[in-house]
Amino acid sequence: MNLALPVLVPALPALGAAATLAVGRKAPGLARPLAIVPVAVAAVLALVVALQLGTGRTLDAGTRLTPTGGPDITLGLHLDGFSSLISVLVGLVATCVQVYSTAYLKEDPRYPSYAALVSLFTAAMFLVVYSGDLIVLLVGWEVMGLCSYFLIGHHWETADARSASLKAFLVTKLGDVPFLFGIFLLGADAGSFRVPDVLAAATEGRLGHPTLTALLLLAGVAGKSAQFPLHTWLPDAMAGPTPVSALIHAATMVAAGIYLVARLLPVFLLSGAALVVLAVMAAVTMIGSALCALAQDDLKRVLAYSTVGQLGYMAGALASGDREASVFHLVSHGAFKALLFLAAGVVIHAAHTNSISAMSRMPGLRKRVPDAYWTTGIALVALVGLPPFSGFFSKEAVLTAAEHAANGEALTNGLGPASAVPQAAGWIVLISAGLTALLTAAYATRLFLLAFHSPAGAAVPTAAAAKARVQALAPADHEAGAPYSPELDEADPATAEPPAMRWPLWVLAVPTMGFGIVGLRSDWLPALLDGGSLRPSAVTAVTGTGLAAVGVIAAYGAWRSATARLGTGRPAPAGGWGRVPEQGGAPAAEVIVADPGRTLLGPLFGPARHGFGVDRLYHALFVRPVGAAAKLVRFLDREVVETYVRGSGAGANLLGRAVRLAQTGNAQTYLSALLAGVVLLAVLVAV
């Protein structure tokens, strides 16, 4: 293979980012091609690299960057089936996002800087995927964090975007500090930061502190991949533009932590304690996020909590010792979650609100956005995990991995002994993943029914009626104070979505529907990875599908019941469409109309809507004490330290004034003072 090809894959988006920043403002017409072309070419090159590498082969190449007095830092490549597969996903999603953004942010004056940051974000993820050195991987890791800060805060004129970007940056940095120490410890034990050398050291048992190293690395993974307890930044990050959400959730930032653990899984297999910690972390994340998703009114926050839960699935597969299943679910999830977010952008563009309850009062919404309607349905079926879509095969692969681990037969595929995975980890993942499958089906069904199939959805509005809905005066049927992550949206609701916002949906729908079948029918996907089987076992397939079906039926029954109660107990709001809340503020009113989530969750609905108070707990335990400490430091600096500084200056000033009084310019006075001094000295000497 020509090494120039894999080198160009991360280099082209980086160069495109620099070019877009350089000429985007001076020549706005060039911003869009400079954003799309380099990323699209990089995606094609990533596919070419994957095809040339083939299955069962690896490529290691590199050059030493600098001596460090210890392990050297190498600018190197480490290509195998995992990196090939994920790089193709990154290229596909990034290209769709760049094309989609040209229409979604058509009138945005800051589009050139936005497009440049998306390109740089893409380049950083390519660097993480292709890097053969942990320090260089860390560089890409941190560049992604910086890009996410700017992209989430793209609409910096809103307080929500500013606070969300700062929160994302600080929470992920909190995990990055121990992550950095974990990399240093790993390099010191292995004598090298190169990934092949680290894996060889782990295989040969030369790592002196495997448990400590694994736990330090997990802290960074928890921050970057939004796992409990560092998951709170991701739902708030929905204040950024919707295409950014698709990029972060599907192919870049949140996938990086899972990819790192998959890459270094032999290190984690040396520590059963670390695997149990990972399993518990995944279990709490899966169940908690699914409950929260079932209670959200903001469409994008539902999808955000969904991402947190699906990342928990991937982490659970890794805790069960099977990185094949984890990466399989990572790729299938990347396709259908990017599709969900981009379809959500189309729906938000048409409805002019993020609120599901507001959408439920809009007649004909699904007929106004048929592309988004059908592709959202496809993606939600994949999310639920129903056959034959890709989510079914990848979810069942995770359940099968957990089942084998629970039986003491972990599918490590030669990376370590099956006994290295504690059976407790398998049981924790298996039980929590089954419960999450049921909850996922429930919140996915709730989302689809409320957004597209409310009783108000029978009529088809005219364009004038669609535009009038944002000017109506009827109150919104929301719960006051519900979490809401608005983004600026200046689109005219009566304007149809442009093709650039529609055809990426169908491009992503193809792998959403067919990736699982195509990947497993000829077994090329297992051959591309570790060579183990990814076919679901009969028990888990029946159990997982059955739990998903129960969730769908329960949500549908609760929705029908709530709709019937609404029809008999309270008339529909007058005015047809009702008022749609402005994007710049939070929802203003009472209760969600016919919400099955209230019936299913009961007393848990309120706590789940607010994330079970985790944010409030962190605010009380960390934010308030730090704020109080900052006020104390400010007081000490201004009132104590500066008082001494000002006092020393004032003392010198007073002394200068006293000395100045003696400078009269009279020679007789000077001689008299001199004589008096001589007499005083003489008396002192004599005495």
Image: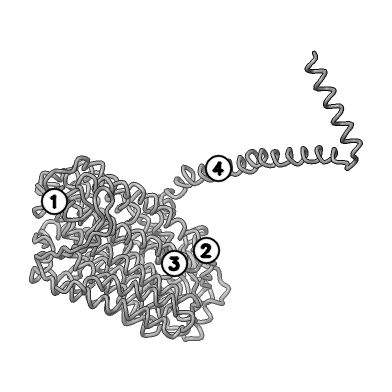
Amino acid on which disc 2 is placed: Ala
Mark 4 or mark 1, which is nearer the start of the sequence? 1
Residue linked to disc 3:
240
Label 1 with label 4: CB-CB less than 8 Å: no
- The correct choice, above or below, for 118 with respect to 660 in the image is below
The amino acid marked with disc number 1 is Ala
User: Could you tell me which secondary element the residue under label 1 belongs to?
Assistant: helix
Q: Which mark is residue 200?
A: 1
Q: Which of 365 and 277 lies nearest the eye of the viewer?
A: 277
- The answer to which image quadrant residue 394 occupies is bottom left
Q: Secondary structure at mark 2?
A: loop
Q: CA distance from mark 4 to mark 3?
A: 30 Å
Chosen colour scheme: one colour
Vertical side of 192 occupied by 657: above or below = above
> Could you say which disc has been placed on residue 586 in the image?
2
Does residue 632 appear anywhere in the picture?
yes
- The disc, 4 or 3, on the residue closer to the chain's N-terminal end is 3
Circle 4 or circle 3, nearest the eye: 4
Q: Nearer the viewer, residue 68 or 10?
A: 68
Quarter of the image with the N terminus is bottom left
Q: CA distance from mark 2 to mark 4?
A: 28 Å
- Measure how far apart labels 1 and 3 are at the Cα level: 41 Å
